[in-house]
Image (tube, rainbow, N blue to C red):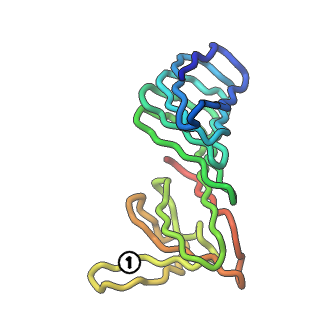
Amino acid sequence: DSGLLDDNVNTLKLEVYTSDNTYFTAYSYTNVDNLEITDPTKVHYNGNTNIAGNFTIKPNGKFDLSTGTIDVTGNIYFEADATGMGQFIDHGTLNVTGTSTVEEYLISERWHLVSPPIDDAQIGVYFDIYLLEFDEPTNNWNYLVLPITIPMPVTKGYYAWSDNDKIGTTTVSYTGNL
């Protein structure tokens, strides 16, 4: 299945339904005010688009920038909740003038493997959440507490535990550069 998007639309909301519910391919060169991905069907996008407003991927929304360029003048939001996380795969070029916010949903009383999706994350994102990093030379997991400005490199993984005695089930928000 494929579709052609019209030039100069205000808000483009891709809600895609295919017979096998796996993917939809959109080809376009267009200008839109806002782009919102809401459907769990993965959108494979090949094109060049200028988004004058915001680019949002709702929980369970899936977007694969297969080729081409998306220029976002506004902000990017990849949202998460109990139903899932917005997914974005970048094989093209994504340029963002505004800020990027990526959410991560943490269920309380269980460990989550996490890795920062932005290049300037700090451990303060996990304030009141137990955060562990692995120290390879000692073969131990160490708690990260203070200072909250300790950087979190993009390629590094961590364990996070949200305790009911502190904040319980919660959504963590990373804001910075993708």
> Could you say whether the residue bearing mark 1 is in a helix, strand or loop?
strand
Q: Kindly identify the residue that appears in the image at 51 percent across and 20 percent down.
A: 27
71, above or below 6, in the image: below
In percent of width and height, residue 80 lies at 65, 54
Quadrant showing the N terminus: top right
Name the residue at 59% across, 66% down: 125
* Total numbered circles: 1
Identify whether 137 is placed above or below 115.
below
Q: Nearer the viewer, residue 1 or 167?
A: 1
| Residue linked to disc 1 | 134
Residue farthest along the front direction in this orientation: 19
The percent position of residue 32, horizontal first and vertical second, equals: 65, 22
User: Is 32 situated above or below 88?
Assistant: above
For residue 84, which quarter of the picture?
bottom right
Q: Can you give x and y, in whole percent of width and height, for residue 81 in the image?
A: 69, 57
Return the residue found at the far top.
7
The residue at 50%/31% (across/down) is 44
| Residue 18 seen anywhere in this rendered image of the structure | yes
Residue lying at 63% horizontally and 47% vertically, measured from the top left = 60
Q: Amino acid at mark 1?
A: Phe
Side of 39 relative to 2 (left or right):
right
Residue 96 visible, this orientation: no
Q: Residues within 10 Å of mark 1 (few under 14, many from 20)?
A: some
Going by the picture, which residue comes out furthest to the left? Answer: 137
Looking at this view, is 19 or 59 the one in front? 19
Residue 98 relative to residue 137: left or right: right
Q: Quadrant of residue 139?
A: bottom left
x then y, percent, for residue 42? 54, 38
Residue 74 location, quadrant: top right
